[in-house]
Image (tube, grey):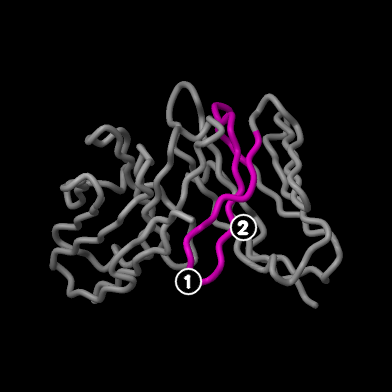
């Protein structure tokens, strides 16, 4: 069964360092998302990506964050200068269509745990 | 700003009994609701959804009920099985006036005891 894959599964970094989290969405999916979950808190939307551009982003997704789909398969989240509060599990997701359609459910990866020291 | 609220962080149920997970929302623009299940060390997986034009959707042991006037939905699992033990996330999205992007709640951890 097709699945969303994410790397790395866990990254530890020093505050102020750049981090890139990688995702390979399901191949025929058109919509891509990043969510994060800080320990004990809700799953928070960061950004969605469609047709090679950001379609929506939350207030969390500030100038320190960027996304890219460099080669048509990978979908990356970059945090330019990490802060302690960026420590979270970051989930990539993809969907074939928008949520309201029959094929709109999001398929999530297993997550990348980011620990900022 | 919690637009989707799951007020019970955990629920413990005996195998074979019914599990009822509750979810409340505040945004009246939401018109599509989803439940996701998450096992440890895995990403959330889609379980069941319901459109606001319906008040019930059933899929095997899982039924979602929607009460639009109360802005409340619930997920019923019957009979509950130990393999159902997971964190359940309620999510909601809007088709107009805003975002198609699902907004998630904090999740409810369900434990089904044998």
According to the picture, the residue beneath numbered tag 2 turns out to be B88
| Mark 1 Cα shell of 10 Å, populated few (<14), some (14-19), many (≥20) | few
Q: Is A84 placed left or right of A14 in the picture?
A: right
Residue depicted at x 76% and y 42%: B58
Relative to B44, say whether B69 is above or below: above
Seen from the viewer's position, the closer of residues B113 and B67 is B113
Please say if the residues under marks 2 and 1 sit with CB atoms less than 8 Å apart: no
Q: Please tell me whether residue B44 belongs to the stretch shown in magenta.
A: yes
According to the picture, the residue beneath numbered tag 1 turns out to be B41
Residue depicted at x 59% and y 43%: B34
Q: Please tell me whether residue A16 belongs to the stretch shown in magenta.
A: no
Residue at disc 2, secondary structure = strand
Q: Which residues are magenta?
A: B25-50
Q: Is A97 placed left or right of A102 in the picture?
A: left
> Which residue is the extreme one toward the front?
A1
Q: Residue B98: x and y, percent?
A: 43, 26
Q: Residue B84: x and y, percent?
A: 69, 65
Quadrant of residue A28 within the rendered picture: top left
Q: Residue B83: x and y, percent?
A: 69, 69
* Cα distance between the residues tagged 2 and 1: 14 Å
Residue at disc 1, secondary structure = loop
Quadrant in which the C terminus of chain B appears: bottom right
Provide the chain ID for the residue under circle 2.
B
Q: Residue B20: x and y, percent?
A: 77, 55
């Amino acid at each position: 069964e097709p699945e969303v894959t994410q790397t790395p599964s866990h990254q530890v970094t020093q505050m102020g360092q750049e981090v890139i989290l990688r995702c390979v969405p399901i191949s025929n999916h058109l919509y891509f998302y990043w969510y994060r979950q800080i320990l004990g808190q809700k799953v928070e939307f960061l950004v969605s990506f469609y047709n090679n551009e950001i379609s929506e982003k939350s207030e969390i997704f500030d100038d320190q964050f960027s996304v890219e789909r460099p080669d048509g398969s990978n979908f990356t989240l970059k945090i330019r200068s990490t802060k302690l509060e960026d420590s979270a599990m970051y989930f990539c997701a993809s969907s074939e269509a928008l949520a309201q359609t029959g094929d709109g459910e999001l398929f999530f990866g297993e997550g990348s745990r980011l620990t900022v020291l | 700003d919690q637009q989707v609220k799951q007020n019970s962080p955990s629920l413990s149920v005996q195998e074979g009994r019914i599990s009822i997970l509750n979810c409340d929302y505040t945004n009246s623009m939401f018109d599509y609701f989803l439940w996701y299940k998450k096992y440890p060390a895995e990403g959330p997986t889609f379980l069941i959804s319901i459109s606001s034009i319906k008040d019930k959707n059933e899929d095997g042991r899982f039924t979602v009920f929607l009460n639009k006037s109360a802005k409340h939905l619930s997920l019923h699992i019957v009979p509950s099985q130990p393999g159902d033990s997971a964190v359940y996330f309620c999510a909601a999205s809007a088709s107009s006036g805003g975002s198609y992007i699902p907004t998630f709640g904090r999740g409810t951890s369900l434990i089904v005891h044998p």
